[in-house]
Amino acid sequence: MQNTDHSPRDGFGSKIGTIAAVAGSAVGLGNIWRFPYITGENGGAAFILVYVFIVLFIGIPVMLSEFTIGRRAQRNAFGAFRLLAPRRPWYLVGVMGIAAAFMILAFYSTVAGWTFEYLRLSLVNGFKGKSPEELNALFENFYTGGWRPVIWQVVVMLLTGGILLAGVRKGIEKYTKILMPMLLVLLVILAIRSITLPGAMQGLNFLFRPDFSKIDASTILEALGQAFFSMSIGMGTIITYGSYIRKKDRLSETAFSVAGADLAVALLAGIAILPAVFAFGIAPSEGPGLVFITLPNIFQHMPGGYFWALMFFTLLIIAALTSTISVMEVVVAFISEEFSLRRRYATIIATIGVTFLGVLCTLSQGPYPQFSLFGRNLFDLMNFSTANIMLPTGGLFIVIFVGWFLGRKNVRDEISNGGTMKVRLFNIFLFLVRFIAPLAIAMVFLNGLGILKL
Ligand code: TRP
């Protein structure tokens, strides 16, 4: 497990770079593609309210726990557990995290690939004059088409691998520091455009006026899954990134900033998308096709739609890439540290492995529906089971580990940077991590899957 080239371990070089990188991981297709359609399918404002509670009382404690594990151990997600809990089975949480990284990337890179095709279509003005049915057919034919989505997916994986080859500071940090501000500017412009459309009020009502009759056990499980997915927690991305945070930076501050940015972007994406959906009289519960069918339809009816489309799909690509690199980094750090391989080789191996599974996933959407399990094709299976099962399970073990195993003194020491700074709310954090978060996750989980009936 030692460093093969005897150089100090790579890591983030600045506070702002750290926040850009972690926020870059959190802010992604989960916020801009997944959040609006999941919110649409689950009734809107009441769902969002549940979501915000989960972020505050479960999401932030899990994120801070992951930072603590990662920075304490200075290791990848698997090695961290092995180091902090030698000869104990905790490393299995790391194993599950590595598996989840493969599974998430498999379907995530598919969707990331779609965004490239849609940027291409926007460039050649490919939505112009198409009816909603035609746009629907365009999307269906494209994603079930076989080779074209596969090619874009490979492009995504190569770009991801390319950034990672450059390392943590010169790769991840450097690119996210440029891309994240761009993303924010684009999104704010789009949101302003959307709320100034005639008829946008209805969309805002849908987002902000809660109807509690829409809430049931499966809605709450969806909110939990969405929060974990959106915050990149529960599988070791944040452990890995945490291991790159400088010892003098404040973990709690980073967790709050990132959680705030992630929530803000999800809400902004909702504001950018749902009012436009209502303004053009489209059902918000469109599902995964929402941004790929509904939005092109809307863009072509808007003045300047050509540019709005370009802007939106550029935004999606940025969001996707700063997240794919973070998931892949989990695998790269694992391979290079645990097998003492140079980063370059680890990156190449990870890219090839992940691309292979990803291509199967993409093909399961179209030409090879026989690539399926438990009655879902691979794509749906990975999307559902990672967010709603593996991440909450990982998160549950992570909070139990930090709350009950790592030791109060160690946790306090790490969060207070070796006692050099005051940590306010430490007891609240510990209480959340020991009792509230594990109980809440376990209950939502068992209830949502129908194992426990509340
Ligand atoms: N959070 C990202 C998004 O919202 C996706 C992502 C990156 C992720 N790393 C992760 C999801 C780790 C789960 C676990 O798009």
Image: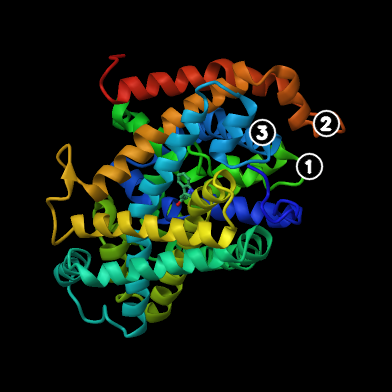
- Coordinates of residue 347 in the picture (x, y in percent): 51, 59
Which class describes the residues within 10 Å of circle 3: few (<14), some (14-19), or many (20+)?
many
Question: Where is residue 368, by image quadrant?
Answer: bottom left
Residue 68 picture location, percent across and down: 66, 33
Sequence order check, earlier mark of 2 and 1: 1
Q: Is residue 260 left or right of residue 311?
A: right
Q: Amino acid at mark 3?
A: Thr
Q: Are marks 2 and 3 in contact (CB under 8 Å)?
A: no
Q: Which residue is mark 2?
A: 418
Q: Tell me the number on the disc at residue 247.
A: 1
341 and 158: which one is in front? 341
What secondary structure is found at the residue carrying circle 2? loop
Q: Secondary structure at mark 1?
A: loop
Q: Amino acid at mark 1?
A: Lys
Q: Residue at x 32, y 66 (%)?
A: 114
Cβ of disc 2 within 8 Å of ligand 1?
no
Query: Badge 2: few (under 14), some or many (20 or more) residues near its Cα, within 10 Å?
Result: few
- Estimate how packed mark 1 is, as few (under 14), some (14 to 19) or many (20 or more) residues with alpha carbons within 10 Å: some
Check residue 68 in the rendering and tell me which mark sits there, or answer none: 3
Q: Report the side of 263 relative to 419 (left or right).
A: left
